[in-house]
Image (cartoon, helix red, strand yellow):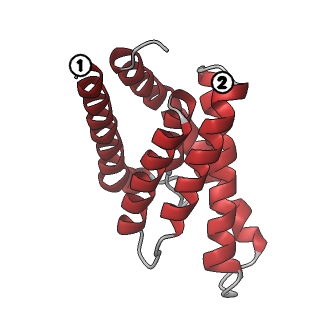
């Protein structure tokens, strides 16, 4: 019973952590844009959880986080949900077998996932409907990544604290 309680507490804390970060994303970051671009925190949240959790749990977190992102992003239906679900499943599985649970691992997954997710978002919502060319991708996605990465150390520390406090050693 104690193990189940620990798992419930851990995921409630992860949910509160993600909700706080998304609230910060929606409430504060739109006012701090530079170069008409603002940081995008959800890939950082997923990268941190992928670093610490096993693939089914990371996939569930990706599913919920993706659903929240789709709910708060205008004219986007299920894009983030599907992408974050599969990213959580694949990356957490690879992390468990190939990487240590360190900040560098979180940085690798965050940067890679950020690049892939923003590229796919651009292709699906801007390039295919002929709303923009590739020059806009580089003028938006690269500054967005540069503005987002300074938030990774803080998010990593919170994610690591939750994991260490509420996960029993394997």
In the shown orientation, is residue 45 left or right of residue 103?
left
The residue closer to the viewer here, 133 or 6, is 6
Image x and y of residue 102, in percent: 60, 20
Image x and y of residue 57, in percent: 46, 40
The residue closer to the viewer here, 121 or 137, is 121
Image height of 154 relative to 131, above or below: above
The quarter holding residue 158 reads top left
> What residue is at 52 percent from the left and 52 percent from the top?
34
Give the position of the N terminus as an image quadrant.
top left
Q: What secondary structure is found at the residue carrying circle 1?
A: helix
> What residue is at 39 percent from the left and 15 percent from the top?
168
Mark 2 / mark 1, whichever is N-terminal: 1
Image x and y of residue 58, in percent: 49, 41
Q: What secondary structure is found at the residue carrying circle 2?
A: helix
Image height of 169 relative to 135, above or below: above
The residue closer to the viewer here, 25 or 169, is 169
Give the mark count: 2
Determine the residue located farthest toward the right in the rendered image: 134
In the shown orientation, is residue 99 left or right of residue 12?
right
Check residue 99 in the rendering and tell me which mark sits there, or answer none.
none
Which residue position holds label 1?
A: 2
Whether residue 35 is visible here, answered yes or no, is no
Image x and y of residue 30, in percent: 39, 57
Whether residue 84 is visible here, answered yes or no, is yes
Image height of 52 relative to 129, above or below: above
Crowd band around label 2 with a 10 angstrom C-alpha radius: few (<14), some (14–19), many (20+) = few
> What residue is at 25 percent from the left and 29 percent from the top?
9
Image height of 96 relative to 130, above or below: above
> What residue is at 28 percent from the left and 23 percent from the top?
6
Is mark 2 in CB contact (under 8 Å) with mark 1? no
Check residue 104 in the rendering and tell me which mark sits there, or answer none.
2
């Amino acid at each position: 019973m104690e193990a189940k309680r620990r798992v419930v507490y851990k995921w409630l804390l992860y949910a509160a952590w993600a909700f706080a970060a998304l609230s910060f994303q929606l409430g504060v970051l739109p006012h701090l844009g530079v170069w008409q671009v603002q940081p995008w925190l959800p890939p950082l949240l997923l990268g941190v959880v992928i670093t610490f959790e096993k693939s089914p749990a990371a996939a569930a977190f990706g599913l919920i986080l993706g659903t929240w992102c789709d709910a708060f992003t205008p004219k986007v239906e299920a894009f983030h949900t599907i992408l974050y679900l599969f990213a959580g499943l694949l990356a957490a599985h690879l992390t468990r077998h190939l990487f240590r649970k360190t900040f560098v691992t979180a940085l690798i997954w965050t940067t890679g996932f950020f690049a892939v997710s923003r590229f796919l978002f651009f292709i699906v919502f801007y390039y295919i409907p002929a709303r923009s060319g590739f020059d806009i991708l580089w003028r938006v996605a690269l500054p967005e990544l540069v503005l987002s990465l300074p938030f990774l150390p803080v998010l990593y520390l919170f994610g690591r604290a939750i994991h260490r406090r509420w996960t029993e050693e394997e």
